[in-house]
Image (cartoon, rainbow, N blue to C red):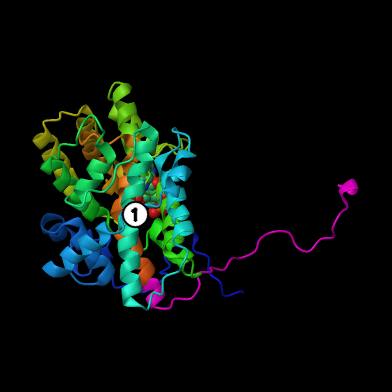
Amino acid sequence: TGAITIDPGYKNSGSCKSEITFLDGEEGILRYRGYSIEELADKADFLEVSFLLIFGELPNKAQLEKFENDIRKHTLVNEEMKTILEGFPKTAHPMGVLSSLTSALTAFNPKSVNVENEKEMYEAVCKTMGKFLVIATWTYRRRMGYPLNYYDNTKGYVENFMRLMFEIPTEPYKMDKKIVDALDKLFILHADHEQNCSTSTVRIVGSSHAGLFASISAGVSALWGPLHGGANQAVLEMLQEIHDNGGDVEKFVLKAKDKEDPFRLMGFGHRVYKNFDPRATIIKKAADDVLDALGVDDPLLDIAKQLEKVALEDEYFKARNLYPNVDFYSGIIYRAMGIPVEMFTVLFAIGRLPGWIAQWKEMRLNKEPIGRPRQVYVGNALRPFKEVKDR
Ligand code: CMC
């Protein structure tokens, strides 16, 4: 065991070879299967990108239509799942409910998928994409005490998300194309990000040959934390706090630099990007466009811009190469769309789902060994047991 090197947080350890996502942190480059994120966000839609990530190539028209249709076939969720949903208090955080419900899907789909069988794997992909979207919206319906909606087969995947979330019996959901298009773009930007914390979790859980739903449920839990996907909620709460404290951004930048203070500037910094996060660049522009198009004037957007400006000029942030990340501006767009803050990380999860599936599939097809890191033991040496009366 003398040869073991410890690398906390795996800062310098690769866990696998992958053909899915290319990321160059120095240059701020992100590509899915060789296509630039800028081009995909501009020209593709979310299901096309999902297909690309999972199956390796962009779908042709027939493949895409079939994919959409096959996902649709799997959007009915077992009625007994509703009993489980109703067991949660309305105050439960949607991410906890989502993780639990994803895990509960294993009860109704107990057969494990044979990853080598293309047809079976394709079915499992469509099933996961269909059911996950629906239960993700259930977490909100439960919170609001609204009745559950069913998927509308005449509408697209992202539009269905908005309908499933917001349509109530007294008020049919009026589709706003600007919102659906912006959301589609946001999902694409979140769709994969190589071996991040939640994706590594999905791969490592799957490496014991646990099923797809079980692995994804673990991914949802990993994503929830504020250092990862939970940052989008934390950013908005931070911006609100700055706003409620008179908008003094300098004060919060000082707090973030203070090593005695646990506060960090949420939405800033990244393990890999050391120049800029290309997703943040696209999202910042989208925030301006979407708020303009919806006619929303959000003081939190001004605060975010001021905060970014002050931080980027600050020696502390410069020296550590800390830049706004994907989570910095996304919440402002979600808020303009009427999405409640507790749902922000659920939206990240919906976007990340195809990435998790693609990575799980690749890991199994590559026959990767069980993930099992080593350690260096630094605890007590052998010592004699003491009876309880002698302790
Ligand atoms: N505010 C203040 N200081 C920071 C921040 C921040 N947001 N991020 C990093 N630092 C400092 C950190 O204190 C350390 O300073 P020093 O060298 O003096 O000890 C230095 O920068 C390096 O940070 P680190 O924690 O060693 O870096 P890491 O790669 O382990 O962590 C991170 C990356 C994203 C967890 C971290 O930057 C962070 O906590 N950011 C805030 C949370 C956030 O926005 N997360 C979303 C990440 S992007 C999307 C996603 O994954 O979901």
Q: Is residue 185 above or below residue 140?
A: below
- What segment carries the magenta color? 362-391
Crowding at label 1, few (<14), some or many (≥20) Cα neighbours within 10 Å?
Answer: many
Q: Residue 225 at what x, y percent from top left?
A: 43, 46
Q: Residue at x 42, y 62 (%)?
A: 202
Which residue is at the front of the view, 323 or 133? Answer: 133
Q: Quadrant of the N terminus?
A: bottom right
Q: Which residue is mark 1?
A: 131
Going by the numbered disc 1, the residue's amino acid type is Lys
Residue at (34% x, 71% y) in the render:
121
In this rendering, position of residue 350 left or right of residue 48: right
Indicate left or right for 222 with 48 as reference. right
Q: Which residue is painted at 61% across and 65% down in the image?
A: 376
Magenta stretch, overall SS: loop
Asked if the magenta segment contains residue 237, the reply would be: no
Tell whether position 389 is magenta.
Answer: yes
Q: Residue at x 27, y 57 (%)?
A: 191
Q: Quadrant of residue 355?
A: bottom left
Q: Is residue 241 visible?
A: yes
Q: Position of residue 279 (x, y in %)?
A: 22, 52
